[in-house]
């Protein structure tokens, strides 16, 4: 065998070279971004674009408290919550539901449980874990149920 041919054969046998050979077709064909599926969000906008603004679907008319279905249930909100914003510094819900405001606004005052932090310490103001009211309390829409629901209230509350 000629020396050049031997060098070539030895090269072929090195795992590194073999690996390069195997990867070559991939490197040649993969232009940047090609072969990556285009992502679509479920909301129909580009994943990096801001979400389209949501609006409340036909909010129910304001009324008195709605009966609870089980004992620990966060009561459902019996009024519209449109434009009731909650930011780091201001909580519109507390404008009516706080202990200092409920008498003049006629709203139910938030219960004592809302002042307790996760270690059970009571605070003078609302606990941060109860700050975002809509996490637990939900407003109602005048909409047909999407699926049949056979849920019945707890017997003690019927
Ligand atoms: C403008 C004053 C006002 C604001 C702001 C307000 N509420 Fe109310 N809320 C009321 C009044 C009044 C009632 C009804 C009280 C009644 O009829 O007994 C009520 C009732 C409720 C109830 C039902 C209580 C129960 O015992 O069934 C919940 C829950 C509630 N509001 C949550 C919220 C949340 C959450 C927000 C913020 C997104 C909010 N409210 C903002 C005035 C307000
Ligand atoms: C982590 C869930 C959660 C969050 C967040 C939360 N609540 Fe509640 N809320 C409850 C539950 C559960 C009850 C019923 C049991 C109780 O009183 O703790 C309740 C009860 C209430 C009641 C009725 C009190 C009564 O005496 O009948 C009002 C009014 C209320 N919440 C308002 C609010 C407001 C306003 C906020 C935001 C500042 C808020 N809640 C945040 C879970 C929550």
Image (cartoon, rainbow, N blue to C red):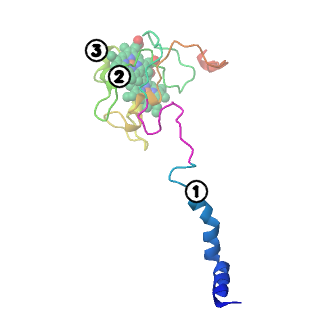
The location of residue 102, given as percent across then percent down, is: 32, 19
Disc 2 element: loop
Give 126 or 4, whichever is nearer the viewer. Answer: 4
Q: Is residue 109 placed above or below 135 in the rendered structure? A: above
Q: Quadrant of the C terminus?
A: top right
Q: In terms of image quadrants, where is residue 2?
A: bottom right
Q: Is residue 38 magenta?
A: yes
State yes or no: Cβ of the residue under disc 2 lies below 8 Å from any atom of ligand 1. yes
Point 65% across, 67% down: residue:
22
Q: Is residue 63 magenta?
A: no
Farthest residue in the right direction?
Answer: 1
Give 16 or 71, whichever is nearer the viewer. Answer: 16
Q: Which residue is mark 2?
A: 84
Point 63% across, 87% down: residue:
4
Q: Is most of the magenta stretch helix, strand or loop?
A: loop
Looking at the rendered image, the disc whose residue lies closer to the viewer, 1 or 3, is 1
Tell me, yes or no, if residue 110 can be seen here: no
Disc 1 element: helix
The location of residue 99, given as percent across then percent down, is: 32, 24
Q: Do labels 3 and 2 touch, CB within 8 Å? A: no
Magenta range is 36-51
Looking at marks 2 and 1 on the same chain, the residue that comes earlier in the sequence is marked by: 1
Q: Is residue 47 placed above or below 79 in the rendered structure? A: below
Q: Which residue is mark 3?
A: 104
Q: In terms of image quadrants, where is residue 89?
A: top left
Point 39% across, 19% down: residue:
81
Does residue 99 appear to the left or right of 71 in the view shown? Answer: left
Q: Which residue is mark 1?
A: 29
Between marks 2 and 1, how big is the CA–CA gap?
54 Å
């Amino acid at each position: 065998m000629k020396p050049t041919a031997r060098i070539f054969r030895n090269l072929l046998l090195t795992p590194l070279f073999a690996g390069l050979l195997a990867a070559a077709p991939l490197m040649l064909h993969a232009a940047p971004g090609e072969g990556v599926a285009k992502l679509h969000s479920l909301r129909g906008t580009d994943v990096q674009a801001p979400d389209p603004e949501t609006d409340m679907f036909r909010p129910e008319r304001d009324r008195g408290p709605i009966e609870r279905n089980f004992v620990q249930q966060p009561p459902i909100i019996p009024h519209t919550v449109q434009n009731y914003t909650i930011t780091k510094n201001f909580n519109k819900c507390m404008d009516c539901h706080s202990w200092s405001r409920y008498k003049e606004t006629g709203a139910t005052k938030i219960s004592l449980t809302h002042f307790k932090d996760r270690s059970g310490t009571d605070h003078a103001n609302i606990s941060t874990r109860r700050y975002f009211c809509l996490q637990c309390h939900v407003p109602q829409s005048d909409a047909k149920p999407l699926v049949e629901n056979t849920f019945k209230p707890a017997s003690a509350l019927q």
